[in-house]
Image (tube, helix red, strand yellow):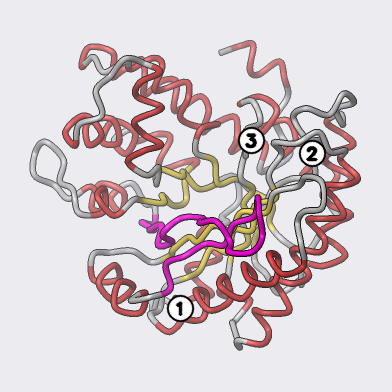
């Protein structure tokens, strides 16, 4: 069968499956490893990710794709097998993070624009040869007094659209990730307003750059209250507001929406996704692209010790299974307790 952007995008949102975000930068994975008192060496990073990719039941049944970091896409397992081949063997699709991070936006205090377009065409060609069939680019939109500005939203939307067009030229499906952060004290309604404006700008720019929506995946935030907001939106409210917001601005041509967990607890991220799928009535598949919400439990169980690998794999399988059920609207909190 010929691989097309559309067929890859559909496989990425296969029913009951989602994406493992294993693309932490060297700085981020060091923080995660520090928390479990493990030194962040190349070998330890490789061993940890290898244990995830070798969790056969989780990978085969619940993980459609894995976002990798530049180091990881080039690494080999202990037995010499490229990590990319382990992912493919498990029936999952290898992907790659290609942005160079959010950098301060000149003239706009407190706001950032994501860099990494220079040389991207050449890097995408190399990543395709290394086995990547989708990519990810994250834009960061913060909510605070006087921000985000239209300039910040538009600059990030333009970069996302240029990245997406370059991906499709390279036969790689773009994951477009405009993340409205949940760090402030804003209400869920304010999150709705900013997310709607951001997504509107992103889809306008994607259209201007002739990006094929059927071969594109959206990775957004959910409509949640800021962490410091005294009144937190409940599970049903988050689900209803997220669906309502996306119905206004996300074209039906997009095959799927894979949510980021964005600082939510493991169980909240699962409960919110499940509530949306239980409500239903939208044109896209709604699934997950979680990093910390899939990995916090296995990292803690592993703690850098080879003898803990089976326990870590069990913890990863549990989180993958719970989120796979949530992607179908079949998760219940009692399933968490039964584990």
Quadrant location of the C terminus in the rendered image:
top right
Residue at 19 percent across and 37 percent down: it is 42
Residue 325: mark in rendering: 3
Label 2 packing within 10 angstroms: few (<14), some (14-19), many (20+): many
User: Is residue 285 shown in magenta?
Assistant: no
Are discs 2 and 1 less than 8 Å apart at CB? no
Return the residue at label 1.
Answer: 4
Q: Earlier in the sequence, mark 3 or mark 2?
A: 2
Start and end of the magenta stretch?
Answer: 93-117
Nearest the eye: 135 or 337:
135
Residue 224: mark in rendering: 2
Question: What SS does tag 1 mark?
Answer: loop
Quadrant location of the N terminus in the rendered image:
bottom left
Q: CA distance from mark 2 to mark 1?
A: 35 Å
Question: What SS does tag 2 mark?
Answer: loop
- What residue occupies the far front of the structure in this picture? 107
- Rendering coords of residue 129 (x, y %): 23, 71
- Rendering coords of residue 283 (x, y %): 78, 64
Label 3 packing within 10 angstroms: few (<14), some (14-19), many (20+): many
Q: Would you identify the image quadrant in which residue 97 lies?
A: bottom left
């Amino acid at each position: 069968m010929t691989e097309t952007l559309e067929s890859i995008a559909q496989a990425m949102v296969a029913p009951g499956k989602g994406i493992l975000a294993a693309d932490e930068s060297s700085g981020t994975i060091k923080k995660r490893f520090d928390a479990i008192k493990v030194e962040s060496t190349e070998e330890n990073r490789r061993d940890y990710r290898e244990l995830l990719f070798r969790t056969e039941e989780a990978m085969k049944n619940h993980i459609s794709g894995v976002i990798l970091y530049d180091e990881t896409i080039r690494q080999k397992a202990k037995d010499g097998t490229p990590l990319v081949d382990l992912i493919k063997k498990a029936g999952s699709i290898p992907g790659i993070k290609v942005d160079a991070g959010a950098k301060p936006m000149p003239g706009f205090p407190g706001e950032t624009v994501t860099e990494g377009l220079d040389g991207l065409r050449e890097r995408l060609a190399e990543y395709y040869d290394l086995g990547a069939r989708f990519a990810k680019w994250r834009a960061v939109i913060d909510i605070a007094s006087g921000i985000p500005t239209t300039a910040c939203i538009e600059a990030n939307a333009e970069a996302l659209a240029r990245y997406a067009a370059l991906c499709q030229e390279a036969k790689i499906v773009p994951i477009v990730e405009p993340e409205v952060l949940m760090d402030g004290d804003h209400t869920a309604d304010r999150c709705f307003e900013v997310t709607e404006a951001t997504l509107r700008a992103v889809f306008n720019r994607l259209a201007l750059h002739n990006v094929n929506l059927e071969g594109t995946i959206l990775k957004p935030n959910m409509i949640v209250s800021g962490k410091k907001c005294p009144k937190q939106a409940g599970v049903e409210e988050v689900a209803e507001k997220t669906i309502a917001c996306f119905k206004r601005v996300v074209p039906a041509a997009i095959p799927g929406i894979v949510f980021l967990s964005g600082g939510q607890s493991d169980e909240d991220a699962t409960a919110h996704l499940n509530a949306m799928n239980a409500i239903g009535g939208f044109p896209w598949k709604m699934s997950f692209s979680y990093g910390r919400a899939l990995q916090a439990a296995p990292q803690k169980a592993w703690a850098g010790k080879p003898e803990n690998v089976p326990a870590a794999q069990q913890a990863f399988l549990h989180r993958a299974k719970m989120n796979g059920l949530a992607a179908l609207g079949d998760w219940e909190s009692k399933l968490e307790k039964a584990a």
